Amino acid sequence: MITKLNKDQLREIAKASKAATACAECSTLSCPGWVSVPGYYDLSKLQIVGTLKSDEAAECWDEYHPAGTHLWSELAPIAIEHHPYNRSDVRECSSCKRTFLHYTEYGGYYLDERIRELNGELIV
Ligand SMILES: [Zn+2]
């Protein structure tokens, strides 16, 4: 079972991640804001360490952008009760411990894997 993380736990993980320097395995992922995972990148290199998904919480599709950011902004706040964070898993590079948020966008005719580096300073 995957651990459901609260905000404090997420902050702890982010803090540890900040100390890690991108290694050869994950340095191709440059994603201060959400990006689609590049087709050549093998997501299984990133291990799931926890999730922000909750079975109990009501579905919430609202995004949180009090400062006028948008989904793709590099400075968009990480609001774990809001979309898409409430659908994200937390993944860690097994080589260097850098951490990322990841969710799958289900479009009508496509699946899009999206990833964003976990920056503790943006957790609200
Ligand atoms: Zn790495």
Image: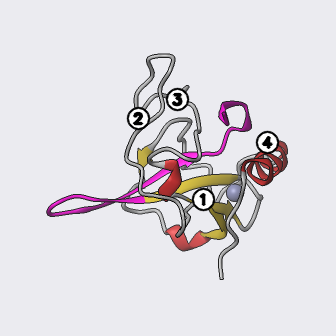
Along the horizontal axis of the image, is 39 left or right of 5?
Answer: left
* Image location (x, y in percent) of residue 9: 79, 54
Residue holding disc 1: 52
Look at the picture and state if 117 lies above or below 88. Answer: above
Q: Which mark is residue 71?
A: 2
Residue holding disc 4: 18
Q: CA distance from mark 1 to mark 3?
A: 17 Å
For the residues labelled 3 and 2, say whether their Cβ atoms are less than 8 Å apart.
yes
| Mark 4, other Cα within 10 Å: few <14 / some 14–19 / many ≥20 | some
SS of the residue at dot 4? helix
Q: Which residues are magenta?
A: 104-124
Q: CA distance from mark 2 to mark 4?
A: 22 Å
Indicate if the residue with disc 2 has its beta carbon within 8 Å of ligand 1.
no
* Image location (x, y in percent) of residue 50: 67, 66
Residue holding disc 3: 76
Q: CA distance from mark 4 to mark 3?
A: 18 Å
Q: Quadrant of residue 24?
A: bottom right
Between disc 2 and disc 1, the foreground one is 1
SS of the residue at dot 2? loop
Look at the picture and state if 92 lies above or below 20. Answer: below
Along the horizontal axis of the image, is 76 left or right of 8?
Answer: left
Indicate if the residue with disc 4 has its beta carbon within 8 Å of ligand 1.
no
What amino acid type should be assigned to the residue bearing mark 1? Leu
Q: Who's the residue at 52% across and 60% down the image?
A: 57
